[in-house]
Image: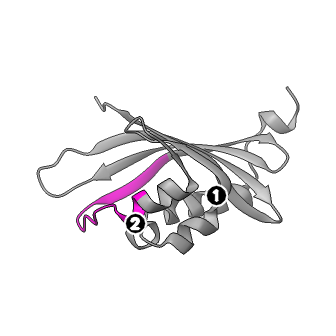
Amino acid sequence: MTLASSRKADYLEESLLREFEEYLLQPNVRKSAKDVMDLLADEFIEFGSSGRVFDKQQIIKSLQNEPIEPLTQRSITEFKTLVLATGVILVTYRIVRHGGSGEQPVHSLRSSIWKLNNDRWKMIFHQGTLVRES
């Protein structure tokens, strides 16, 4: 294991990647093909919490068709980074999705791999896993 692969990202990288992850949770961003396209690498792949696998074009189309739930709020907790190699960072966190009144919160574990490409961070991989909260 190299030194680079055993450390967390520096504060600026970590803050920027958290900002990107939070940005991608906003309903207006999720509906914008351009906004999503700007943050996803061409080779992007997602293993969805549904068990389905998506490429960049499929996830953009899926997000555009996603129903807008005005009372739904998502919050990120337990945000961590790990440098895998120079210009490649693994991000892990938990999302709690709060729906309308009476709905139980939905918890999921998330992981993303971000790669620095021409001085721009692009997400190349994402996975969401639903978890039971006890």
Q: Nearer the viewer, mark 1 or mark 2?
A: 2
| Distance CA(mark 1)–CA(mark 2) | 23 Å
Residue type at mark 2: give it: Gln
Residue 96 highlighted magenta (yes or no)? no
Residue under the image location 31 percent in, 30 percent down: 132
Task: Pick whichever, 5 or 113, lies toward us.
Answer: 113
The magenta region covers 62-77
What residue did someone put label 1 on? 17
Give percent across and percent down for residue 17: 64, 58
Up-down relation of residue 43 to residue 51 (above or below): below
Q: Which residue is mark 2?
A: 64
- Residue 1, image quadrant: top right
Label 1 vs 2, first from the N-terminus: 1
Q: Point out which mark residue 115 bears.
A: none
Q: Are marks 1 and 2 in contact (CB under 8 Å)?
A: no
Q: Quadrant of residue 92?
A: top right
Give the vertical position of 29 relative to 104 (above or below): below
Of residue 78 and residue 93, the one placed in the foreground of this image is 93
Of residues 18 and 64, the one drawn nearer to the viewer in this rendering: 64
- As drawn, is 13 to the left or to the right of 87? left
At x 83%, y 65%, the residue is: 118
Mark 2: secondary structure = helix
Few, some or many residues within 10 Å of mark 2 (<14, 14–19, 20+): some
Under mark 1, the amino acid is: Leu
Judged left or right of residue 13, residue 37 is left
**Residue at image point 34% right, 63% down:** 65
The crowd level at tag 1 (other Cα within 10 Å; few <14, some 14-19, many 20+) is many
Counting from the top left corner in percent of width and height, residue 32 is at 47, 73
